[in-house]
């Protein structure tokens, strides 16, 4: 009995030793892989000897907030058009609607938020639509093809639109139709989320709005098997017109 217990103890010890050895070897490999991601920085007087920096393939080019917003929005499947004035914004709106009318979305019924600038721009578009309604009832919005709104701010580093309800009734107009066109001023594009929240608080009619909507690209939904579907719980097409 004593011999059997000793054999079991020896076997258990051997197993634990083997596990420890494999874990140590794995940690060494991971550490070596991490080290290869970095290169030493030239050390000058007063520099800390341990300072390291990520390896770089070349000099970084600083992007403006508008350029970064456009890049990040297009990375998540959105479309961004930068225009110089209102006349060019009208032409871009006309072109977007004309393109959507050649798709299954049709873009014949257009729902507008209650922003005066949206109504003004849409009155000038050169595309024929069947119905143009400003701030329709929520139940009716399911029958519209496109929603057109403004955005009170945007976040450059994530390509995100920021819509706040104090300035405009646009929450459902931006969520229920299968296509959403948003208009944002270049001066309202902030670098980070924190910058955007401070900007909205500072410029809101009564401080921070009670409802803020963040929109980053078209709606995406994944099931338990991570099968991605576009446009199930929101618009499947997102266009943003940035006015300089």
Image (tube, rainbow, N blue to C red):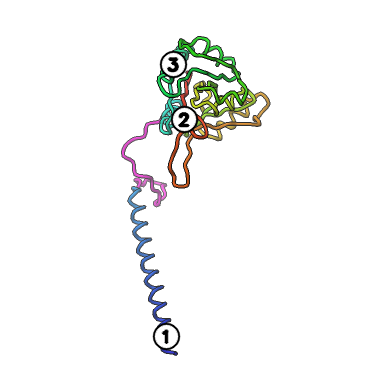
Regarding mark 3 in the picture, which secondary structure is present there? Answer: helix
Regarding mark 2 in the picture, which secondary structure is present there? Answer: loop
Find residue 34 and report its horizontal and vertical position in percent. 36, 52
Label 3: which residue? 92
- Which segment is the magenta one? 40-62
Question: Which one is earlier in the sequence, the residue at label 3 or at label 1?
Answer: 1
Does 70 appear above or below 98? below
Q: Residues within 10 Å of mark 3 (few under 14, many from 20)?
A: some
Q: Residues within 10 Å of mark 1 (few under 14, many from 20)?
A: few
Can see residue 162?
Answer: yes
Most foreground residue, 52 or 146:
146
Q: Is residue 20 left or right of residue 115?
A: left
Question: Which one is earlier in the sequence, the residue at label 2 or at label 1?
Answer: 1
Does 190 appear above or below 56? above
Q: CA distance from mark 3 to mark 2?
A: 19 Å
Res. 6 mark:
1
Label 2: which residue? 236
Q: CA distance from mark 2 to mark 1?
A: 67 Å
Figure quadrant of residue 212: top right
């Amino acid at each position: 009995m004593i011999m059997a217990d000793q054999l079991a103890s020896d076997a258990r010890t051997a197993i634990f030793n083997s596990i420890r050895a494999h874990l140590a070897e794995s940690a060494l490999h991971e550490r070596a892989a991490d080290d290869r991601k970095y290169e030493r920085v030239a050390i000058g007087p007063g520099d800390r000897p341990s300072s390291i920096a990520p390896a770089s393939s070349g000099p970084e080019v600083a992007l403006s907030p508008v350029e970064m917003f456009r890049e990040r929005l297009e990375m998540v499947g959105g479309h961004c058009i930068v225009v110089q004035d209102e006349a060019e914004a009208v032409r871009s709106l006309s072109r977007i609607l004309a393109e959507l009318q050649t798709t299954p979305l049709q873009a014949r019924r257009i729902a507008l938020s209650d922003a005066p600038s949206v109504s003004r721009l849409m009155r000038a578009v050169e595309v024929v639509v069947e119905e143009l309604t400003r701030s329709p009832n929520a139940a009716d919005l399911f029958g519209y093809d496109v929603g057109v709104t403004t955005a009170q701010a945007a976040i450059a580093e994530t390509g995100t639109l920021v819509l706040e309800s104090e300035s405009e009734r646009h929450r459902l107009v931006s969520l229920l139709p299968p296509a959403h066109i948003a208009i944002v001023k270049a001066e309202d594009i902030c670098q980070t989320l924190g910058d955007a929240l401070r900007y909205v608080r500072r410029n809101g009619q009564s401080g921070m709005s009670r409802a803020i909507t963040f929109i980053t690209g078209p709606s995406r939904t994944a099931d338990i098997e991570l099968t991605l579907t576009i446009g199930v719980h929101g618009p499947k097409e997102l266009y943003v017109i940035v006015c300089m």
